[in-house]
Image (cartoon, helix red, strand yellow):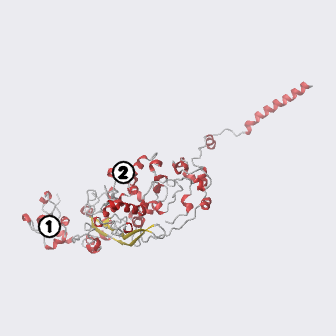
Amino acid sequence: MAKERFLFFLSLLIIGVIAACSAKPAASPAPSESPTEEISATPMPVSPVSDECIACHTDKQRLIDTSAPVVEAEGESKGVG
Amino acid sequence: MAPLEPWEKVIVDNEKFSQTDHGEKTCIECHAGVNAAEKESAHTDMIASPSADPQKFCAECHEEETANYANALHNTQAGYWTAINTRNGNVPEDHENLQEMFGNHCATCHTTCGECHVSQPKNVGGGLFSGHVFETTPPMTRSCTACHGSRVGNEFLGKNEGFPGDVHFREARMNCVKCHEGAELHGTADSATAPDHRLSGAEEPKCTDCHMLSNDGIDMHQRHGDTLSCQVCHSITYTSCDGCHVEVSSKTGNPFFETEATYTTFFIGRNPLQSEDRPYEYVPVRHVPAAPTSYQFYGENLQSNFDAAPTWVYSTPHNIQRNTPQNASCEACHGSVQFFLTADKVRPEEMTANQNVIVSALPAPVDLILAAMPQPAEHASLVSNSCVACHEKGVRDAMAYPEDHAVYTNESCSSCHVLPKE
């Protein structure tokens, strides 16, 4: 009886493995030559810029919030320079 | 040009910049500082203008331009010193005061690589002009005419009320670098031949680089091409200035200047810089705001040699037109006293300084020129070029010139009495 139960579970396991293996290719998208895949295959360039610098200097509101107050220098020049 | 908001001056268009060669470097590689989120920490020891040290930051890729730029006028400002030293007489004791004056008022016009190619010049408030993308061709109004605005820019763009802009801009939308190419602006490799003034050395650019005169069929080009600069016939009224004085404010400690007057003129004068490169007898002249007391704040008699340089200077107005009042006909110019810098138009205290520029004898009326006796053919082989030497008193059977010729200069004889053509 124990032997039959062992063979039964072994059969189930084999069937399960075969089913899993046969289902996988169908679930995966077929290999394609789309540009998207080519790009993803290429190593992404390391960001050439320092993140904190760029994070601030591309954020208009942050630049406004952190800009030093503008001190209007009293211009005493007269005439065309 | 409207002033930029502080954020506008420093915002980076990283989408574009990161695609450029300069974008391959990190910010810190050029600007130093620290990669930190908080502004003050990030800006620790930051270098705002890396190209102020071009050898360190630019030469690696732009070796030739960097080497040449060391001798370029935008970098050396040698033209300023030529004028300052000439009017000072190169007095060694004055140099410290003049150096201080120069540092306060003139050095702000010094231009770095970046101030043409990535940002507006500091002199006009600075600020990135294309989100930190480096421009091979500097944008004209935000770079070139941002500094060269009150005269060249206004003339070229037609901003002087009542006077059209330069035909090269109006008709062809040419920008500055169409004529003033990078090679000219970047300077020369040889420091020995580096210009000490914008008009020293070869004429560059030359109108005739594009406009060939030899076979254009225009009679006036054949008659006057060697004796008049192109601008004499083809420029119109332009700006002159008087009496610039510089000081440091006792209130704010900031340097400032004051000019006495700005006005428009068009005067043809004698060429004070006649040379093989600029052989013209006549050129348009512009009054520069130099005055004997311009630098008085910095010391007495700092321009003790004031008369050594004219105040009406060789000018190249940037408002070229095909048709101008003076080239409307021969008679429009010949005999038209209003176009010429005659002595009555020069301040008495500047007469000596301008003695080589003042036109003492107007070109003769055309009918007189046409009636004038040509020179005999054998004059072509004369060693002396002094007509007066023989014709003043009739030496060697030469005909003495009539009394009414006394107003003409020796150099002007051949403009009426021409050599017969071979």
Which mark, residue B161?
none
Q: Determine the image quadrant of residue B388.
A: bottom left
**Residue B177 appears at what percent x and percent y?**
41, 57
Name the residue rendered at 53%, 68% in the picture. Answer: A72
Q: Position of residue A30 (x, y in %)?
A: 69, 39
Instruction: For mark 2, give the secondary structure.
Output: loop
Residue A12, percent across and down?
84, 31
Q: For mark 2, what is the residue?
A: B188
Q: Where's the C terminus of chain B, which quadrant? A: bottom left
Extreme residue toward the front, this view: B93
Answer with left or right where residue B39 lies relative to residue B309: right
Work out whether B100 lies above or below B54: below
Position of B25 with respect to B94 (left or right) is right
Q: Amino acid at mark 1?
A: Met
- What is the residue that sits farthest to the top in this orientation? A3
User: Quarter-wise, where is residue A64 in the image?
Assistant: bottom right
How many numbered dots are placed on residues in this image?
2
Q: Is residue B173 visible?
A: no
Determine crowd level at label 1: few under 14, some 14-19, many 20+ residues with C-alpha closer than 10 A.
few
Amino acid on which the number 2 mark rests in the picture: Thr
* Mark 2 crowdedness (10 Å alpha carbons): few <14, some 14-19, many ≥20: many
Q: Position of residue A62 (x, y in %)?
A: 62, 59
| B368 lies left or right of B306 | left
Residue at the left extreme of this rendering? B397
Location of mark 1 (residue): B373
> Please, is residue A14 above or below residue B255 in the view?
above
Same chain for mark 1 and mark 2? The answer is yes
Alpha carbon of mark 1 to alpha carbon of mark 2: how far? 48 Å
Q: Nearer the viewer, residue A51 or B164?
A: A51
